[in-house]
Amino acid sequence: MSEGPQHRMCDRFRGFLPVVVDLETGGFVASTDAVLELAATILRMDDDGLLRTHRTYDYHVTPFEGANIEQSALEFTGIDPYHPFREAVSEHDAFTELFRVIRKEIRDQGCTRAIIVAHNAHFDAGFINAVVARCQIKRNPFHPFSHFDTATLSGLAYGQTVLAKACAEAGIAFDNGEAHSAAYDAERTAELFCEIVNRWKECGGWMPTFE
């Protein structure tokens, strides 16, 4: 008796592993402003071929030497980068550890490389690439310029580009009091991405065919 088709992440996104990321920063300029928090949510595919959140990894990050931190950014995020109980690690250690996790997930899921999923993905990708260059990290698992942007996708799917409003339209609970922490925003963005991808599948959109 046939077990039916095997749904594999590597067949869904051109061999790429989508990883949802969010960074909280000290400003908007990737080359000069500090990364303060880093989070990534790993996604997996269930037996029905639907995308689900799996696990979130998050890090408090120590500002690099000479980094710019705008007071307005701290007021917006509520982060105290020098709080004694923050347990922050260096950019190098945070990104090296996260990249190690992602490379293992790429191997486990049979993918070729990872691709960034983020809300306004160009922003997060710019900071990631700046850290990679600054810390001379050699094995960046992410595609160098392609991303999935949930601001664009949710504008198409729900007519909303703000994360909180897009989540509301998608029926995803969103607490503005918890927002602007990297882990919380990554998890809500991941739920939103899964909802859009799964909705597309259920509406008859393209999916891999199996012999």
Image: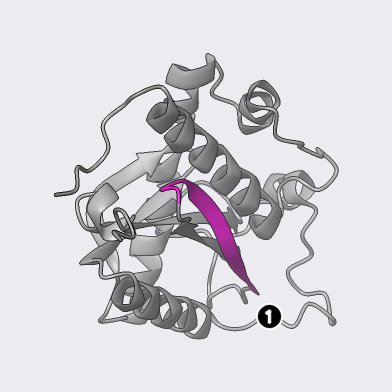
Q: Residue at x 38, y 53 (%)?
A: 116
> Residue 109: x and y, percent?
33, 69
65 w.r.t. 172: above or below: below
Q: Which residue is mark 1?
A: 88
The quarter of the rendered structure image containing the N terminus is bottom left
Q: Mark 1 falls on what kind of element?
A: loop
Does the image show residue 38? no
Q: Which residue is the extreme one toward the left?
A: 211
Q: Residue at x 68, y 48 (%)?
A: 73
Does the image show residue 90? yes
Q: Which residue is the extreme one toward the front?
A: 1
Q: Residue at x 19, y 50 (%)?
A: 14
User: Would residue 26 be found to the left or right of residue 13 on screen?
Assistant: right
- Magenta span contains residue 50: yes
> Residue 202: x and y, percent?
44, 28
Viewer-closest of 65 and 12: 12
User: Would residue 171 be found to the left or right of residue 9 on screen?
Assistant: right
- Magenta span contains residue 145: no
176 w.r.t. 99: above or below: above
Residue 174 falls in which quadrant of the image? top right
Viewer-closest of 49 and 19: 49
Circle 1 residues within 10 Å: few <14, some 14–19, many ≥20: some
Tell how many labels: 1
Residue range of the region highlighted in magenta in the rendering:
48-59
Q: What's the magenta bit mostly, secondary-structure-wise?
A: strand
66 w.r.t. 22: above or below: below
Viewer-closest of 186 and 63: 186
Q: Amino acid at mark 1?
A: Ala
Residue 105 falls in which quadrant of the image? bottom left
Q: Residue at x 30, y 81 (%)?
A: 136
> Residue 82: x and y, percent?
77, 74
> Residue 106: x and y, percent?
32, 72
